[in-house]
Image: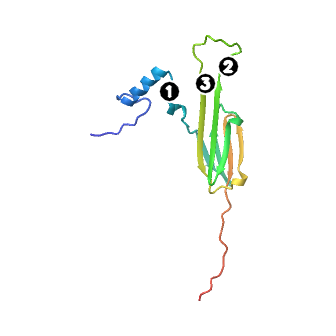
Amino acid sequence: MFEIIPMTHSSRSFWSPFREMDNLARAFFNEPFFYEKAQVRPFKTDIRKTDEGFVLEAELPGFKKEDISVGIEGDVLTVKAEHSTEKEDSEKNENFVRIERTRSSYERRFDVSEIDVENIGAKYENGVLVLTLPGKEPVTPPSRQISIG
């Protein structure tokens, strides 16, 4: 019987030539392939409906307010968070064995076609970005009489 087995981090028991090539490159260059460096990951988001519209809560722990940008283009709201860390010592030691720097980039996009984008509110506290998204007032077409000819 044929079965589909999802590939997760814990189910790496099957041989893969691509994984072997990746391991070889990691061992040779002592760093991950380029696609892992440029990876943009999503972040956890909760959206709840309120009487006025919606509240979006995005978990972004470890980021400063300056690292987060929220923008709107057309009917798409984009939340981006980027930061990099560098460990600096007060004493420069030229005999270091390894120095590591990290760069994290997160991005999510949301449809805001039913949102009053002029009145969106935002605050960032304790690693959680909270966006208040008021709903648009429903537009009803004006009523009129049509003459029969």
Q: Amino acid at mark 1?
A: Pro
- Measured as percent of width and height from the top left, residue 86 is found at 65, 24
Residue 60 makes an appearance in the image: no
Q: Amino acid at mark 2?
A: Glu
Q: Which residue is mark 1?
A: 32
Q: Amino acid at mark 3?
A: Arg
- Measured as percent of width and height from the top left, residue 43 is found at 58, 38
Label 2, residues with CA under 10 Å away: few <14, some 14-19, many ≥20: few
* Number of callouts: 3
Q: Give the quarter of the image for residue 66.
A: top right
SS for callout 3: strand
Mark 2 → mark 3, Cα distance in angstroms = 10 Å
Q: Which residue is mark 2?
A: 88
User: Which badge, 2 or 3, comes first in the chain's sequence?
Assistant: 2
Label 3, residues with CA under 10 Å away: few <14, some 14-19, many ≥20: few
Mark 1 → mark 3, Cα distance in angstroms = 13 Å
